[in-house]
């Protein structure tokens, strides 16, 4: 069984290698190969899962060491895998949702001539993500971490002919680098503190109190920085909205279901470090709470359906990070919400992609409206995802989000009240913006616009069979696209209840630990409050968008709305602080370089040159002037000799 | 006659020769001035030999003469070939090596 773990990673990696190097002869079958290998990985995951279920709870961790990557005296990096309950959860999520999205992409990318390459990148992503969650040491995790970053970059910029996509890819890569720097510093700190970076020894040492709290706090904060970069948390959140330039399946798989949750995985995996550093945990909860409100507010103002969903993703991951910062009372719920979110958010994105597919790749929700009659399957699946995300009782989001809100209150003290209130407020805003998306897209009157003219064709995704000047003809998407949406909708509906009653928390407990939080509010009170604020959010949104016609051009809006449309000024902030600051810094450095460093060098050269220029004049080519100097020199020598004699 | 007078004469001849070397341009004249300086040295050597009563100075004078003869041979050959090449015996014209 142990040997199967490497195969999990190897299958999609093989797919990536074959598809990316195979050339055009694979164009016909490439997408099938990619999908097949992702499915193979999923099947292996299922086999390992069945095997794991057959063992006792404490004996479920599998190890496989492939070989020693870097054997140096006092430093050993292994290519080694560790499969425990936490990794298993991720493996099933990644390969399961990944396979569905591969299937969806077959239909979605049908008209794209670079489809083979797209599937190669997708396979590369799946392989890197599996490596990330299966690694048994932080260095290999870092390898996978960079791998998913690369795949994300390649896929965001997949339509590289669009300048906006190329820029968005670059932005995502750069912002992620800041976080990656945090991870590499954390690994270095671990190595200097513990002498190793394998999960087992590091976490045991952290739990055993072998290192000072200050050091552990430093490591934990660096890990948090890494998580912020990858999971688009404040302050490194600015890349996620632009990442929606990528094809919609990519947004669903990478920027909603899996890669962006890697930060949560990192925090939960490093639970022992965070447990030993309460200050860092507090920072984690603050980051989570700020981000869940930030993302939700941004999501309220966006008219681009994908960007609204991106704000929502940010906000939901904020919930997970908040839960992960709560310690053992929250880890399991963070992962539970992560999985349910993986289902319903991937489903929502695929639904959005299906809508765009039928609407000539229009993304502006103000130009949708009344689509429920034309796309029934999309409407139903999107609707179920919508009910799941707002936490409608009985659907998956209800179980996982409710638990997080309860755990936030259970943090205790003033912090608990503040965090709990933030989480509740977030739930209300979530209900508001999701209802807004739902109403603007599927209800109300038609606000369709003719397809953009070919002059602006650069903004149209390739493969769109758009006819300039005609109104779109919304139609249901092909089966390859609706099938994954249906399956994900089933997950959105059932996953929460399944986890709740099948004992998800007990399943994860050996890895993450679990404590029952003692909430000042009873569970029933929290649940009631959650449902009430959810209904409140839905009601407000209905009054605003359902009762009145939606204007086709966005109204100017309040100050907050305008700020939220600009992503709450995050880019402006980055521009003023980092871009302008960086420019000033480089300019002053260039000035110092020019005036001081170059000054010294050029000055030396100039003075030597001037001196030699003067000395050169002595060499005038007249023999008699040389003779004079010889006579003069001789005279001086003789005079000196005589003088010495006399003295 | 006081041998010191010979030394004065030698100094005078040497000065004339040195001045000639410094101020004249014609290679032949320059050459003759060099010879003048050499012979002033010879005179000084011989005078010193007489003053000190040993033969060292005279021996060295012979050496000097041999060297001067060899130098004349080589030097005149150079001057003649330079004159043939450049139609000038001026030392200032031979400044090809100047920057």
Image: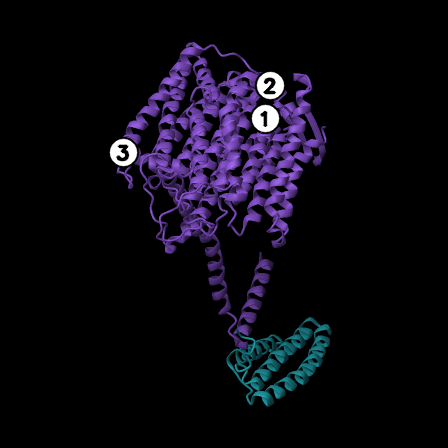
Chain colours: A purple, B cyan
Q: Residues within 10 Å of mark 3 (few under 14, many from 20)?
A: few
In percent of width and height, residue B40 lies at 61, 78
Find numbered disc 3 in the image and state the secondary structure of the residue it sits on: helix
- Residue that badge 3 annotates: A559
Find numbered disc 2 in the image and state the secondary structure of the residue it sits on: helix
Q: Nearer the viewer, residue A356 or A407?
A: A356
Chain letter, disc 1 residue = A
Q: Give the image quarter of residue A194.
A: top right
Q: Nearer the viewer, residue A354 or A254?
A: A354
Find numbered disc 1 in the image and state the secondary structure of the residue it sits on: helix
Chain letter, disc 2 residue = A
Task: Give the answer, above or below, for where A516 lies relative to B52.
Answer: above
In percent of width and height, residue A139 lies at 62, 33
Q: Could you tell whether A409 is left or right of B29 in the image?
A: left
The residue lying furthest to the front in this view is A373
Q: Earlier in the sequence, mark 3 or mark 2?
A: 2
Q: Are marks 2 and 1 in contact (CB under 8 Å)?
A: yes
Q: Is residue A224 visible?
A: no
* Distance from the alpha carbon under mark 3 to that under mark 1: 43 Å
In percent of width and height, residue B19 lies at 52, 78
Q: Are marks 3 and 2 on the same chain?
A: yes
* Distance from the alpha carbon under mark 2 to that under mark 1: 10 Å
Q: Are marks 3 and 1 on the same chain?
A: yes
Of the 4 image quadrants, the one containing the C terminus of chain A is: bottom right
- Residue that badge 2 annotates: A507
Q: Earlier in the sequence, mark 3 or mark 1?
A: 1
Q: Residues within 10 Å of mark 2 (few under 14, many from 20)?
A: some
- Tell me what residue is drawn at x 45 percent, y 13 percent: A410
Q: Could you tell whether A201 is left or right of A540 in the image?
A: right
- Residue that badge 1 annotates: A89
Q: Nearer the viewer, residue A445 or B84?
A: A445
């Amino acid at each position: 069984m142990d040997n199967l773990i490497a195969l999990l990673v190897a299958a999609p990696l093989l797919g990536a290698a074959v598809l990316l190097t195979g050339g055009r002869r694979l164009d016909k079958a490439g997408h099938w190969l990619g999908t097949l290998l992702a499915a193979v990985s999923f099947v292996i995951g299922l086999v390992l899962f069945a095997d794991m279920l057959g063992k006792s709870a404490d004996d479920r961790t599998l190890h496989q060491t492939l070989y020693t990557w870097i054997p140096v005296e006092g430093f050993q990096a292994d290519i080694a895998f560790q499969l425990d309950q936490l990794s298993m959860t991720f493996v099933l999520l990644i390969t399961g949702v990944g396979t569905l999205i591969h299937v969806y992409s077959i239909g979605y990318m049908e008209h794209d001539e670079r489809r083979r390459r797209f599937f190669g990148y997708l396979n590369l992503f799946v392989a890197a993500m599996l490596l990330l969650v299966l690694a048994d040491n932080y260095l290999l995790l870092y390898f996978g971490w960079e791998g998913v970053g690369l795949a994300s970059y390649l896929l965001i910029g997949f339509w590289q002919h669009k300048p906006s996509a190329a820029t968005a890819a670059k932005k995502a890569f750069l912002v992620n680098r800041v976080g990656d720097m945090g991870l590499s510093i954390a690994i270095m700190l671990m190595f200097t503190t513990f002498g190793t970076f394998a999960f087992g020894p590091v976490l045991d040492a952290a739990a055993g109190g072998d290192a000072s709290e200050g050091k552990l706090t430093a490591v934990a904060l660096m890990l948090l920085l890494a998580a912020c970069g990858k999971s688009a948390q404040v302050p490194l959140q600015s890349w996620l909205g632009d990442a929606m330039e990528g094809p919609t399946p990519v947004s669903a798989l990478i920027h909603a279901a899996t890669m962006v949750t890697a930060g949560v995985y990192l925090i939960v995996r490093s639970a022992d470090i965070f447990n030993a550093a309460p200050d860092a945990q507090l920072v984690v909860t603050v980051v989570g709470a700020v981000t869940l409100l930030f993302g939700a507010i941004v999501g309220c103002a966006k008219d681009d359906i994908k960007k609204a969903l991106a704000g929502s993703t940010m906000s939901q991951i904020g919930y997970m990070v908040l839960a992960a910062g709560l310690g053992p009372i929250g880890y399991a719920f963070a992962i539970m919400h992560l999985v349910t979110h993986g289902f319903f958010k991937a489903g929502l994105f695929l639904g959005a992609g299906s809508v765009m597919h039928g609407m000539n790749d229009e993304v502006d929700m103000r130009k949708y409206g009344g689509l429920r009659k034309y796309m029934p399957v999309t409407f139903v699946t999107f609707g179920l995802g919508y009910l799941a995300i707002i936490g409608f009782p009985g659907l998956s989001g209800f179980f996982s989000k409710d638990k997080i809100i309860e755990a936030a209150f259970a943090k205790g003290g003033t912090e608990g009240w503040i965090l709990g209130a933030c989480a509740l407020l977030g739930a209300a805003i979530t209900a508001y913006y999701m209802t807004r998306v739902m109403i603007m897209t599927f209800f109300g009157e038609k606000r369709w616009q003719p397809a953009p003219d070919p002059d602006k064709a650069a903004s149209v995704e390739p493969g769109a069979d758009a006819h300039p000047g005609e109104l779109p003809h919304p139609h249901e998407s092909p089966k390859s696209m609706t099938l994954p949406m249906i399956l994900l909708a089933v997950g959105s509906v059932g996953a929460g209840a399944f986890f709740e009653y099948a004992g998800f928390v007990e399943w994860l407990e050996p890895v993450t630990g679990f404590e029952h939080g003692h909430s000042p509010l009873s569970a029933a009170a929290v649940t009631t409050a959650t449902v009430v604020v959810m209904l409140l959010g839905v009601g407000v949104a209905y009054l605003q968008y359902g009762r009145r016609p939606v204007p086709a051009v966005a109204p100017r809006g309040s100050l907050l709305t305008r700020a939220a449309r600009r992503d709450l000024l995050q880019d402006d902030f980055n521009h003023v602080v980092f871009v302008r600051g960086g420019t000033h810094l480089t300019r002053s450095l260039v000035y110092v370089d020019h005036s001081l460093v170059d000054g010294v060098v050029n000055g030396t050269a100039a003075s030597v040159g001037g001196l030699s220029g003067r000395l050169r004049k002595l060499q005038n080519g007249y023999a008699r002037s040389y003779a004079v100097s010889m006579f003069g020199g001789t005279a001086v020598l003789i005079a000196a000799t005589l003088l010495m004699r006399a003295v | 006659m006081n041998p010191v007078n010979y030394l004065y004469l030698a100094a005078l001849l040497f000065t004339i020769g040195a001045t000639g070397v410094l101020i004249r341009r014609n290679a032949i004249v320059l050459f003759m001035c060099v010879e003048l300086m050499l012979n002033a040295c010879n005179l000084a050597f011989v005078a010193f030999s007489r003053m000190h009563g040993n033969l060292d100075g005279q021996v060295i004078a012979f050496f000097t003469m041999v060297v001067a003869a060899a130098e004349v041979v080589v030097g005149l050959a150079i001057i003649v070939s330079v004159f043939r090449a450049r139609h000038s015996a001026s030392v200032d014209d031979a400044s090809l090596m100047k920057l």
